[in-house]
Amino acid sequence: MNRKDILGNEIKSECVGCAIVRGEVKLPGGIIYDGKSIILAADPEIPIPGFLIITSKRHIQSFAELTVDERAEIGNAIAIAERAIKDLKIAETVTLVQEERSKHFHIWIFPNQEWMLEKFGYGLQYLRDINAFAKDNASDADIENVIRTAEEIKKYIESEDKYD
């Protein structure tokens, strides 16, 4: 599998989730939150500011495989990430996506931004088109904005200990 992250680095692992956990994928803006069982970061493949991914540190596929503690940590991460996206005016709403097809448990926290709604419409059926458009049309300034936004979200979460 020949994949590249938004920074132009080749992702050599068959499992992107495992590569993230092992530190083999350079995450735009770095790790936002490094928890006991999850990592929260900007999506390394889609250049959309505020598009976050929660990745399980364990190589599991399904939400049903999570422990009670892992589910609690993920719930906290979703709530705080969503609050950051809204409070920082990145987007007014988010879409959460989790599918088992990728073989490594992760959740997308997708910011529904105005340009997306204007160009594509609203709903899950447009996410792949939006992602493809963002990848195909990303400029260096867009990549820098993804990095800057991830750093702002990290500062937001770290300030006032918003994760506790």
Image (cartoon, rainbow, N blue to C red):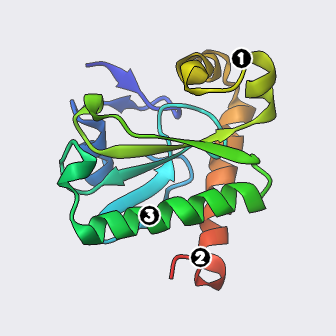
The image quadrant of residue 81 is bottom right
Q: Tell me the tag on residue 158.
A: 2
Report helix, strand or loop for mark 2.
helix
Report helix, strand or loop for mark 3.
helix
Q: Residue at x 35, y 51 (%)?
A: 55
Q: Residue at x 63, y 23 (%)?
A: 134
The image quadrant of residue 104 is top left
Q: CA distance from mark 3 to mark 2?
A: 17 Å
Task: Establish if 116 lies above or below 156.
Answer: above
What amino acid is labelled 1 in the image?
Phe
Q: Which residue is mark 3?
A: 75
Q: Confirm whether residue 131 shows in the render.
A: no
Q: Which residue is mark 1?
A: 120
Depth check: 66 or 27 in front? 66
Q: Position of residue 13 (x, y in %)?
A: 23, 33
What amino acid is labelled 3 in the image?
Gly
Task: Establish if 4 lies above or below 81.
Answer: above
Q: Residue at x 28, y 45 (%)?
A: 105
Depth check: 127 or 151 in front? 127
Q: Residue at x 80, y 53 (%)?
A: 89
Q: Position of residue 32 (x, y in %)?
A: 51, 61
Label 1 environment density (alpha carbons within 10 Å; few <14, some 14–19, many ≥20): few
Q: Are marks 1 and 3 in contact (CB under 8 Å)?
A: no
Q: Which mark is first along the chain, 1 or 2?
A: 1
Q: Confirm whether residue 163 shows in the render.
A: yes
Q: Are marks 3 and 2 in contact (CB under 8 Å)?
A: no
What amino acid is labelled 2 in the image?
Glu
